[in-house]
Structures are given as structure tokens and as C-alpha cells.
Image (cartoon, rainbow, N blue to C red):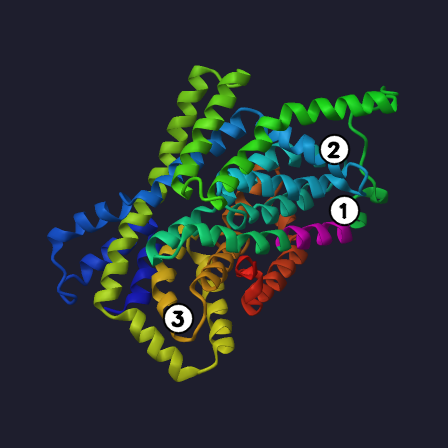
């Protein structure tokens, strides 16, 4: 049975990704000499490893922050720092997405949270709804690049590289992506805003605030947002200082977000129940994919698929640069058709051994792979970020696509930089 076409056929029939992988293994169990009795234990052993506990905990922290109104406080702080910049709300959306990514580790969650807050304000200030949704979807990629990142946790767990080093390696690419999005927004501001200027907020027209009043208001906003601002500092500072592991950091983040939300009295008992249920369902969906793809990956090892890929690649080229170009194209196509976490779990074990044979640093290759696959969140037919941004900003997806081109170009340029300038990912080794 040919694996590729069979897998595609199963997916086209509407079978969930994780189950599709398992069906493919079952269909080939006899040929691969797989003992069916060990399949449940493979799945169980995979999803009960300690690092994966970080996924539901980070998701819980993000849900609590979002429903507790803390995201609005973060965007208000961003507004203060760049309020005098032309078309500053677009920059606020980018920076807020980065902060949200540092809390949830999820791209789709970042798009939904920021679109429902900053996105609405941008449209009220005169931005084109289609452009607002395009910027929202693009900036949501920062939810994957800015640590903690769920795909990086998955990659580190399944390939066997340090998650802490992966988080460090993703910082510089994340910062460069922030800068790229802000440059694109600044360049397009005059096109998407009448006269290139935002409308003032509705509440500002009647105000004649003195300088002292402005300072007082800004101080008040900063103080209110301080608990929210401390969460990324607490999580990332604790990880990088060695005080706790990424999984322990996820537990700290969840408990901290719960305490802050309860202390602010912004979420009632019934809402807490819904938040925990929503988090459990999201985490369960991810873990099911992890468990079932682990069966498929075990079969790939038995069939020696990674070794075959390495042997084929070496016959095509002996140049690491050409190999990386081929990998980029493959991953971009895979990202278009597969969910980000599933694609990471599938392609990581397949390609990582080959990359090592070409002398490519495992940490550098991890950032290349995850960044490439995440671009699938912006490229149909899957394109989860596009659909969430369109729904959140209440705009037809065709209007969103009209404004997406330059952001995709920025992503591809940054992808080339990340791929061919290893120091961007391995910067932390220079100190």
C-alpha cells in the first residue's frame, strides 16, 4: 500500500487527522509485522510524558487571561507606548499578539483574543475590515514563534531536543517577525486609512486633559496591567534562569492566571467551569493527535522511512543549502494541508535525522521546521488563522485575502533569513 496517496485519500474522506494515521498503520500492520496488542501502550506512553503536561496548562493560563479581561489591559499598555506613532493601532495589534503568544503558546487562540479586542477597535477607528482581519491573522503567527510555543514543546518531546533551548532559539526569529509585520503595516497605513490617520476614540472628543491628567491616566493603566505584564516575565524568566522547567513554568502560569482572575473578580464560578471545560477539550484534541501520530511514527521507524528519506536526499544533493531549500518547499506544502501540531509530529521525526546528516544543528532545524509549517495557518485550504480572523472580525474571507499578500511576502523573507542565517536561531550560544 502506498503511504502518501492512501493517507491523502483517508484525509479527503473527512477522517480526523490522528485517526487517519492510525487507520493507515492498521491497514499495514501485517506488512510491518506490528503486534496490535502494543498499539494502545504506544499511544498511552507517548501522551503521558512529563513535558506534554505543559500543553493543557499553558492553554488554561491563556483562557483565563483572555476571559478575565487581562488582554485588554495588555493592549492598553501597548497603546500608551506607541500612541503617537502614525496608524499606531496596527502596531498595537502586532505587539499585543506577541504578548498573547507569550501567554498561550497558541496561534489560533492569539488570533481570536486579539481580533475580538484590538480588531474591533481598529475597525471603529477607520481601518478596512479586510485589512484588519489580514493583519490579525498574520500577527497570530507570533503565537507559535514567541515562547512558550506548543509546536516547539511537541517537537522537543518527540525528537528529543531541549525545549528550553528551543524557546531561546525562537526569541530572535519572533522579534524579527514582529519588526517585519510592523514595517509592512507602516508602509500600507496610507492605503488602508482615509488620509492615513486614525479616527479618535469616541470618548476622547469631549476631553481636554492636561499633561498631568494624561500622565495620571497612563500610570493608572500601567498599574492595572502590571499583573498581566508579570506573567510572561514570570514564565520566561523562570525558564531561562533555570528556576523551573517549561512544564513547571506552565503550572506556575496557570495558577498565577487563576489567582489574578479570581482576585480581579472578572470571572464568575460558572465561567470558570466553562473555561476549564474548553481548555480540557482543546488539550484533549491535541493529545489525541499526538497519541495517534505516535503510532504512525513508530511504523515509519520500523519501515525505515527516515533512513530512506536521508538516502534519497543525499543522492539528490550533497549541499546543505539545497537540502534546506527542498525541505522548505516540502514543509510549506505540508503546512497547507495539515494541522500545525500534527504536521510537526509527523515531519519532525522524518526529517530531523536527515538534517543531522547534513551537519545542520538540531535546534536550528527545529525552528526552520516549525516556522515553515506555521505558515500553513495563512495558506488555504487549511489556513486556520484566516478563518478565525474572518469570523472574529466579521468580514468575508475574500476581503481578507485581498490584503494578505504583503504579509505573506514578509513571512517568506523572514523564513529565508531564519533558514540561511543560523545565528538568528542560535544567537544565545554567542554569549
Name the residue located 76 percent from the left edge and 22 percent from the top edge. Answer: 217
Secondary structure of the residue carrying numbered label 2: helix
Given residues 197 and 256, the one toward you in this image is 256
344 left or right of 41?
A: right
Residue labelled with disc 1: 192
Query: Range of the magenta residues?
Result: 177-188
Label whose residue precedes the other's in the sequence (2 or 3): 2
Cα gap from disc 3 to disc 1, whole angstroms: 45 Å
**Quadrant location of the N terminus?**
bottom left
| Picture layout, residue 367 above or below residue 128 | below
Q: Which residue is mark 2?
A: 80
Sequence-wise, the earlier of marks 3 and 1 is 1
Q: Which dot, 1 or 2, sits closer to the camera?
A: 2
Residue 185 in the magenta stretch? The answer is yes
| Residue that mark 3 sits on | 356
Left or right of 119, for residue 44: left
Residue that appears at 63% across and 55% down: 176
Of residues 424 and 29, the one nearer the viewer is 424
The number of numbered badges drawn on the structure is 3
Amino acid at each position: 500500500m502506498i503511504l502518501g496517496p492512501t493517507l491523502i485519500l483517508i484525509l479527503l474522506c473527512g477522517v480526523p487527522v490522528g485517526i487517519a494515521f492510525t487507520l493507515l498503520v492498521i491497514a499495514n500492520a501485517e506488512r510491518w509485522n506490528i503486534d496490535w496488542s502494543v498499539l494502545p501502550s504506544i499511544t498511552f506512553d507517548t501522551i503521558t510524558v512529563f513535558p506534554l503536561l505543559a500543553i493543557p496548562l499553558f492553554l488554561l493560563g491563556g483562557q483565563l487571561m483572555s476571559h478575565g479581561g487581562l488582554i485588554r489591559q495588555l493592549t492598553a499598555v501597548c497603546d500608551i507606548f506607541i500612541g503617537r506613532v502614525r496608524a499606531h493601532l496596527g502596531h498595537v495589534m502586532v505587539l499585543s499578539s506577541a504578548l498573547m503568544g507569550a501567554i498561550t503558546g497558541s496561534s489560533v487562540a492569539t488570533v481570536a483574543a486579539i481580533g475580538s479586542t484590538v480588531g474591533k477597535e481598529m475597525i471603529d477607528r477607520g481601518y478596512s475590515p479586510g485589512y484588519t482581519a489580514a493583519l490579525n491573522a498574520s500577527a497570530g503567527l507570533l503565537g507559535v514563534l514567541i515562547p512558550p510555543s506548543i509546536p516547539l514543546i511537541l517537537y522537543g518531546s518527540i525528537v528529543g531536543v531541549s525545549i528550553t533551548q528551543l524557546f531561546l532559539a525562537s526569541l530572535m526569529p519572533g522579534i524579527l517577525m514582529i519588526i517585519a509585520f510592523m514595517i509592512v503595516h507602516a508602509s500600507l497605513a496610507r492605503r488602508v486609512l482615509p488620509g492615513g490617520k486614525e479616527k479618535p476614540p469616541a470618548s476622547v472628543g469631549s476631553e481636554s486633559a492636561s499633561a498631568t491628567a494624561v500622565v495620571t491616566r497612563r500610570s493608572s493603566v500601567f498599574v492595572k496591567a502590571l499583573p498581566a505584564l508579570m506573567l510572561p516575565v514570570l514564565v520566561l524568566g523562570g525558564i531561562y534562569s533555570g528556576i523551573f522547567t517549561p512544564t513547571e513554568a506552565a503550572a506556575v502560569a496557570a495558577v498565577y492566571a487563576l489567582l489574578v482572575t479570581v482576585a480581579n473578580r472578572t470571572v464568575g464560578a460558572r465561567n470558570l467551569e466553562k473555561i476549564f471545560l474548553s481548555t480540557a477539550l482543546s488539550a484533549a484534541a491535541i493529545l489525541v493527535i499526538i497519541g495517534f501520530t505516535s503510532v504512525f511514527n513508530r511504523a515509519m521507524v520500523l519501515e525505515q522511512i527516515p533512513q530512506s528519506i536521508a538516502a534519497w536526499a543525499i543522492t539528490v544533493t550533497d549541499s546543505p543549502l539545497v537540502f534546506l531549500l527542498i525541505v522548505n518547499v516540502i514543509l510549506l506544502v505540508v503546512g497547507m494541508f495539515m494541522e500545525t501540531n500534527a504536521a510537526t509530529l509527523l515531519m519532525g521525526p522524518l526529517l530531523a535525522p536527515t538534517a543531522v546528516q547534513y551537519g545542520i544543528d538540531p535546534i536550528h532545524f527545529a525552528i526552520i521546521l516549525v516556522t515553515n509549517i506555521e505558515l500553513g495557518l495563512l495558506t488555504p485550504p487549511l489556513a486556520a488563522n484566516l478563518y478565525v480572523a474572518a469570523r472574529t472580525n466579521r468580514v468575508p474571507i475574500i476581503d481578507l485575502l485581498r490584503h494578505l499578500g504583503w504579509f505573506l511576502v514578509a513571512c517568506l523573507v523572514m523564513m529565508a533569513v531564519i533558514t540561511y542565517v543560523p545565528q538568528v536561531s542560535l544567537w544565545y550560544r554567542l554569549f
